[in-house]
């Protein structure tokens, strides 16, 4: 939550050896579970009730990659893996290609 202790959480990054925070997101929704890409250039995260997003560590526009999901991780081939419900029932693990947004 950065320096603000109340309200929904946003995504911040902090350089090692510095106390300065850089805010990457600023919404009224709660953003959680940030995961760094293998090359350190992007973060994937969850936004409560809105889905899974990816944003550059430098800031800028975010990209929605799934309407639903939880537990986000990166693969070495520049895809993300999420846990998501299958047809509103059982949960499964899906790989999402960031090039095509294909889910498998």
Image (tube, rainbow, N blue to C red):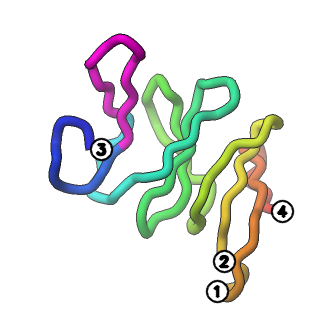
Q: Residues within 10 Å of mark 3 (few under 14, many from 20)?
A: few
Return the x and y of residue 8 as percentages of the image width and height.
26, 56
Rendered position, 94 above or below 96: below
Report the front residue among 81 and 103: 81
Q: Earlier in the sequence, mark 4 or mark 1?
A: 1
Q: Earlier in the sequence, mark 1 or mark 3?
A: 3
Reading the image, the residue beneath label 2 is 85
* Quarter of the figure with residue 54: top right
Reading the image, the residue beneath label 3 is 26
Image quadrant holding the N terminus, namely top left
Disc 1, disc 3: CB below 8 Å? no
Q: Residues within 10 Å of mark 4 (few under 14, many from 20)?
A: few
Please give the name of the residue rendered at 41% of the width and 15% of the height, measured from the top-left corner: 16
Q: Which mark is residue 15?
A: none
103 sits left or right of 64 in the view = right
Q: Which residues are magenta?
A: 11-23
Q: Earlier in the sequence, mark 2 or mark 4?
A: 2
Image quadrant holding the C terminus, namely bottom right
Q: Nearer the viewer, mark 3 or mark 2?
A: 2
Reading the image, the residue beneath label 1 is 88
Secondary structure state at the residue bearing disc 4: loop
C-alpha distance separating marks 1 and 3: 29 Å
Rendered position, 41 above or below 51: above
Reading the image, the residue beneath label 4 is 104
Please give the name of the residue rendered at 50% of the width and 27% of the height, measured from the top-left corner: 57
Secondary structure state at the residue bearing disc 2: strand
C-alpha distance separating marks 4 and 3: 31 Å
Q: Residues within 10 Å of mark 1 (few under 14, many from 20)?
A: few
C-alpha distance separating marks 4 and 1: 17 Å
């Amino acid at each position: 939550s950065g320096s603000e202790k109340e309200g929904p959480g946003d995504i911040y990054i902090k350089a090692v050896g510095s106390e300065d925070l850089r805010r990457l997101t600023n919404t009224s929704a709660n953003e959680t579970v940030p995961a760094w890409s293998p090359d350190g250039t992007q973060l994937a995260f969850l936004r409560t009730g809105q889905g899974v997003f990816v944003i550059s560590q430098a800031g800028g526009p975010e990209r929605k990659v799934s309407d639903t999901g939880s537990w986000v991780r990166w693969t070495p081939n520049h895809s993300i893996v999420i846990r998501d419900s299958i047809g509103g029932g059982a949960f499964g693990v899906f790989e999402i290609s960031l090039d095509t947004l294909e889910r498998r």
